Amino acid sequence: MPGTDKSDRSFSAVTDQEALDFHARGRPGKLEINPTKPMATQRDLSLAYSPGVAVPVKAIAEDPSRAFDYTARGNMVAVISNGTAILGLGNLGALASKPVMEGKAVLFKRFADVDSIDLEVDTENVDEFVNCVRFLGPSFGGINLEDIKAPDCFIIEQRLREIMDIPVFHDDQHGTAIIAVAGLINALHLTGRDLKTTRLVCNGAGAAAIACVELVKAMGFAPENVTLCDTKGVIYKGRTEGMNQWKSAHAVETEARSLADAMEGADVVFGLSVKGALTEDMIRSMGDNPIIFAMANPDPEITPEEVAGIRDDAIMATGRSDYPNQVNNVLGFPYIFRGALDVRATTINDSMKIAAAQALADLAREDVPDDVAAAYQGVRPRFGPQYIIPVPFDPRLISAIPAAVAKAAMDSGVAQKPILNMDLYAHELSARRDPIASTLQRIYERVRRHPRRVVFAEGEEEQVMRAAVSYVNQRLGTACLLGREEQMRETARLAGIDLDRPGIELVNARVSRRVEAYTDYLYSRLQRKGYLQRDCQRLINTDRNHFGACMVALGDADAMVTGITRNYSTALEDVRRCIDVKPGHRMIGVSLALCRGRTVLVADTAVIDMPNAEELADIAEEASGMARRLGYEPRVAMLAYSTFGHPTGERSDRVREAVRILDKRRVDFEYDGEMAADVALNADVMEQYPFCRLSGTANVLVMPAFHSASISTKMLEELGGSTVIGPLLVGLDKSVQIVSMGAKDSDIVNMAAIAAYNAAS
Ligand SMILES: NC(=O)C1=CN([C@@H]2O[C@H](COP(=O)(O)OP(=O)(O)OC[C@H]3O[C@@H](n4cnc5c(N)ncnc54)[C@H](OP(=O)(O)O)[C@@H]3O)[C@@H](O)[C@H]2O)C=CC1
Ligand SMILES: CC(=O)C(=O)O
Ligand SMILES: [Mg+2]
């Protein structure tokens, strides 16, 4: 079959403990609320609260549409569940559904910049549930119903749609149907099938299943070719047991009574039931080139490995992210609501759903550009059986799907605020993408393609062990944990960490056969700096930074990460005794600051205390090289307290001189200065200097000295709510990264991945 690649689980599953730790760490759960206006002064309080707040209150009372101007309503969606059908886990109650609902709320934000809050409603009574939700309408721009069992979900959604004037969308029905249909359109195309004669069996007759079969019939499937099955078997005409009106509407005349009967010769099977519901015999009995969407979560009705074991002509999809072809409603709900909110749609109608499905299907057929390939494990996918649908991290989704949905809303007359310039809208949509996620994604995917052996020097620390396990689980390479084996095993046992897995190596410096080689190497470097052979031997035997750095220096490992037990400068001194600066380069620290959707690189945040003009020019060169390696085209601002000569002062002269040096060096990136931070970062302020050579606001900030770099990045983090990654060490001959003391396991993995990435580049 064209385009078939070897089936490949793209990245690791997580352990139960990792999942619990992830949710428990820091502030428990996955969500918090942040104000969007300052609330610092008496005046702020007077504006935000009494008396100022009375003004928008009266305006909204006069004209309800003003709520979209003066409140968060227009970008706010509630994810509401009673927990009666949580994923494929069944009815576990409202409270137990909260992790899933928080997760959906976070996905709204992450993928489409929609603010979202989860609401768990503790009732299984349909009237109570409807009443609860209907009165919440003024709070939200949309309602996303989730994991409510059939048939209650049909009644609830229908009634809420009738009484509410905002979009009400049951994700498990329509979200799932839209994505499944998008995948199906492409799978039918690849197998050359005509949908009028294609036979589909759907196992499960609940929320997701009923919506899917309704949509495939709306697409043109013949009703007699679509067979629904539930726990009682085939839903045939005349069946009475376990029926309801929604199932009856899809009952067929057939002799088949069991799922196995129905599957014989079928072209397509949709699994929307529970783990393991499809057997190998059933799959064997299907027609040629069968299309198998096993969509139960978290575990599918049958696994891709099981299918691959019995036939090689199937197009296989699951609801999970760790197999190719993820048919999951995460591809739909964030973007569908984004489009609906942006045109202030009163509802999400069939035209909008079909537009979303078609846009998704079309996207999978397009060539994948370079910057998108990273989202696909760095392997550029080609439309085919292993790639019938884009992955959730595909950065094109945010512009393609909402635009299609918004246009369909306008064309079908449900948009209250039409978009006038669709090109501009597509551009605005792309700007909503979270840039750090793409950057880290790119780094991780590149390392996955070139897995690296990384030394985790502080291997006895619990969070370092967790980071090492995560590094290996994510298929980034081998993790060498340095430490005393007994100590590491005991700590791991107490913390419930499993170190006995392929890819984790425990390295004890005291008994290593490489001690002699490392000692000789270190002695050759330090003998004229006051060190005796036995001093070097002691360093190698007892100091893990020295041992680890020598592993990297002598090629026994590709990269190293350290830093949680020692301050940065001490760790750096240890490393520098073993590793040189790359010839022709200067060692600096670059921090990545991510704030309100913007990423800036700040340098030098680690090494040179008070750089002279020459050194500032070097910093600009190193930082711009790093920016390029991370996928940014550098626009470097040489920062000072003054801008282009005013006010004057010795510190600014040095920065101005650095700009002249860069001019002489004829470097191949944009730079200018000296300039103040607001000129560098604010386009309106920059406009006051029309001669400024930067083509846009700066994305690389060269600070005049270490102290200003360190102070400003820490302030950004503590006061500005920015995420700061780094300092990343740049310019060393071998790849080493130093985390800050007390770093969390997730920070350590990120740094290990960056170290591995630098080793590869
Ligand atoms: N990939 C995705 O994006 C999505 C996947 N899903 C998955 O679909 C499944 C169903 O979810 P949802 O529709 O919301 O839940 P519902 O509770 O509404 O429906 C469940 C349906 O599954 C049927 N069922 C349960 N066990 C079996 C079995 N062994 N054989 C045949 N049918 C069975 C039930 O039959 P009966 O009517 O006889 O009780 C019922 O019809 C879940 O696994 C969920 O994770 C859901 C939404 C999105
Ligand atoms: C994905 C989803 O919504 C579900 O499995 O219920
Ligand atoms: Mg769901």
Image: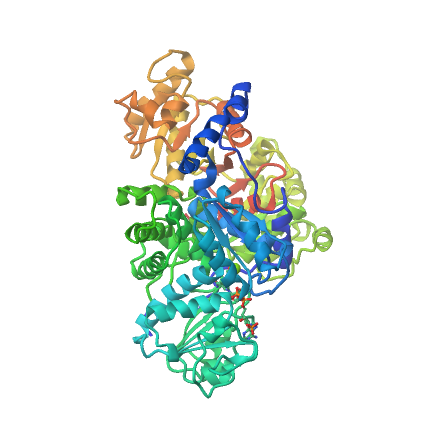
Vertically, is 157 above or below 760? below
Q: Say whether residue 156 is left or right of residue 324.
A: right
The percent position of residue 151, horizontal first and vertical second, equals 53, 66
Vertically, is 204 above or below 367? below
Q: Residue furthest top?
A: 648
In this rendering, the count of numbered labels is 0
The one of 183 and 521 positioned closer to us in this rendering: 183
The one of 133 and 112 positioned closer to us in this rendering: 133
Which quadrant of the figure has residue 667? Answer: top left
| Residue depicted at 60% across the width and 50% down the height | 22
> In the picture, which quadrant includes the N terminus?
bottom left
The percent position of residue 261, horizontal first and vertical second, equals 48, 85
The percent position of residue 498, horizontal first and vertical second, equals 66, 58
The one of 202 and 443 positioned closer to us in this rendering: 202
**Is residue 388 in view from this perspective?**
no
Q: Say whether residue 459 is left or right of residue 758.
A: right
The one of 508 and 40 positioned closer to us in this rendering: 40
| Residue depicted at 63% across the width and 42% down the height | 27
Vertically, is 187 above or below 143? below
The percent position of residue 513, horizontal first and vertical second, equals 63, 54
**Is residue 72 in view from this perspective?**
yes
What sort of colour scheme is used for the picture? rainbow
